[in-house]
Image (tube, rainbow, N blue to C red):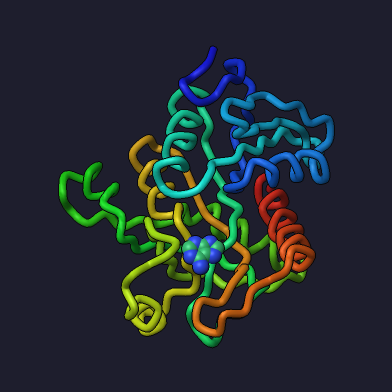
Amino acid sequence: MATPHISAEKDAFADTVLMPGDPLRARYIAEHFLQDAQQITAVRNMYGYTGFYENQRVSVMAHGMGIPSCSIYATELITEYGVKNLIRVGSCGAVRDDVKVRDVLIALGASTDSRVNRLRFNGSDFAAIADFGIVQTLVQAASANEIPVRVGAFYTSDLFYHPDGELTERLRRYGVLGVEMETAGLYGVAAEYGAKAATVCTVSDHMVSGESLDSDERQTSFNQMIRIALDAAVR
Ligand code: ADE
């Protein structure tokens, strides 16, 4: 069995899939956090693996950058492979003074400049919200690991290099914690096909102060976030 973008066998994915944007992050998670991980797909080098975490079957599959790429993989995982829970594990920018690089954030809901949810929701505004149960489990897992997390509003943009000079100020005023490029689309896909989804991100850069993490620091905060996501996946 294969889809246009995934070459895995029919039952190759676990019910819960962690989804980083970067395929090499997917490989890193499989090699450093899972036991007996097998690579199950590599179409376009968008790697997917299934292995065991605390004796429970868990998968990890990269989704690439942006809503269109993420939506393709999320849709095929749900509709063709029967995946039930998608946990995006990514990085994001921050705009507010009270959100710092290295912070771990959970996206309760995501506003967006993308039109994808209007396309699927017949022109109406769709409230792109996380699955409450996954969010609750992520918060519990963070607390058990004594890793502080914040839960709140995200903004998903189609543009990494945004021409709207007022954007960051508006996002600050509206209380947006994290800015990234996938979550509103992921939550729309999950709603459309009856799956559950949530995003957890580490803040890699501050869009106002200009501060950003170097690659070692990125790795440390990434590891903390993966621990939270995997603990949540098996709870
Ligand atoms: N992902 C990480 N940092 C980002 C930013 N500043 N804007 C959009 N996506 C991001």
Kindly tell me whether residue 144 is visible in this rendering: no
Residue sitting farthest toward the left:
123
Q: Position of residue 19 (x, y in %)?
A: 59, 44
Q: Residue at x 36, y 84 (%)?
A: 173
Residue 30 lies left or right of residue 63; in this view the side is right
Residue 209 lies left or right of residue 179; in this view the side is right
Kindly tell me whether residue 199 is visible in this rendering: yes
Looking at the image, residue 201 lies above or below residue 151: above
Q: Position of residue 94 (x, y in %)?
A: 52, 74
Residue 107 lies left or right of residue 232; in this view the side is left
User: 106 or 159, which is in the foreground?
Assistant: 159
User: 208 or 98, which is in the foreground?
Assistant: 208
Q: Residue at x 46, y 28 (%)?
A: 76
Q: Quadrant of residue 69?
A: top left
Tell how many labels.
0
Looking at the image, residue 112 lies above or below residue 65: below
Q: Residue at x 80, y 45 (%)?
A: 33
Q: Quadrant of residue 141?
A: bottom right
Residue sitting farthest toward the top:
1
Quarter of the image with the N terminus in it: top right
Looking at the image, residue 88 lies above or below residue 107: above
Q: Position of residue 133 (x, y in %)?
A: 52, 53
Looking at the image, residue 148 lies above or below residue 142: below
Q: Residue at x 41, y 47 (%)?
A: 67
Q: Position of residue 55 (x, y in %)?
A: 80, 36
